């Protein structure tokens, strides 16, 4: 019998001063049995960074062809696809062909550096792509926030994210 996802609930309050977006979100995150707390919380951070009425979580690790998050407008136009981790270059290229904008929020310490060195040249040709990087320490701090029921306040100002006492500075690689 297959293991079931663990359900996490998050009440997320977003105050994004950079975009002028202020809203509260009641989110349900399904953590796949093979997903770590760190990855789940990076998905939540990606939501906070791009929060809006049309943004939603994808099917997750159980679906190879869906991103972690996607923003689809009411007319069905794919505005933004967001991947977390270190996705394959062909997956990122394919996403750039489907959406107006693609964001990769990379995490994983030294493996991000290796991934970036291998893919930076190919990614440079993708004008719709933004790549952000979290440090290993930032990923660990996010993972420590994971609880089945979370109430989180997130403030974003001048590219710095303040989430429940943690200061995150996603580095823009592209």
Image (spheres, rainbow, N blue to C red):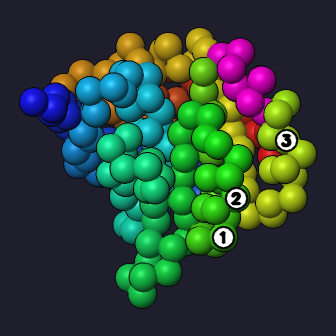
Magenta stretch in the rendered image: 109-116
Relative to residue 78, is residue 139 depicted above or below? above
Residue 83 percent across, percent down from the top left: 54, 47
Residue 172 is at least partly visible in this image: yes
- Assess disc 2: are there few (<14), some (14-19) or many (≥20) residues with their C-alpha within 10 Å of its C-alpha: some
- SS for tag 3? helix
Q: Are marks 1 and 2 in contact (CB under 8 Å)?
A: yes
Q: Quadrant of residue 172?
A: top right
Relative to residue 98, is residue 45 depicted above or below? above
The residue where tag 3 is placed is 120
Q: Quadrant of residue 112?
A: top right
Q: Do the residues labelled 1 and 3 touch (CB within 8 Å)?
A: no
Residue 159 is at least partly visible in this image: no
**Residue depicted at x 85% and y 41%:** 120
- Assess disc 1: are there few (<14), some (14-19) or many (≥20) residues with their C-alpha within 10 Å of its C-alpha: few
The residue where tag 2 is placed is 93
**Residue depicted at x 74% and y 30%:** 115
Label whose residue precedes the other's in the sequence (1 or 3)? 1
**Residue depicted at x 84% and y 50%:** 122
- SS for tag 2? helix
Q: Name the one closer to the observer, 19 or 89.
A: 89
């Amino acid at each position: 019998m297959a293991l079931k996802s663990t359900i996490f609930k998050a009440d997320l309050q977003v105050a994004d001063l950079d975009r002028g977006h202020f809203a509260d979100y009641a989110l349900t995150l399904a953590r796949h049995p093979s997903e770590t707390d760190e990855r789940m919380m990076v998905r939540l951070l990606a939501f906070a960074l791009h929060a809006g009425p049309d943004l939603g979580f994808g099917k997750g690790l159980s679906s190879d062809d869906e991103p972690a998050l996607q923003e689809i407008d009411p007319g069905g136009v794919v505005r933004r696809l967001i991947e977390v981790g270190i996705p394959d270059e062909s997956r990122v290229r394919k996403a750039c062909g489907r959406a107006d904008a693609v964001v990769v929020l990379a995490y994983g310490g030294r493996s991000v550096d290796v991934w970036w060195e291998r893919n930076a040249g190919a990614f440079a040709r993708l004008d719709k792509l933004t790549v952000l990087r979290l440090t290993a320490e930032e990923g660990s701090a996010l993972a420590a926030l994971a609880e089945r029921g979370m109430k989180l306040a997130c403030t974003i100002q001048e590219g710095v994210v303040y989430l429940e006492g943690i200061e995150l500075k996603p580095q823009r690689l592209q």
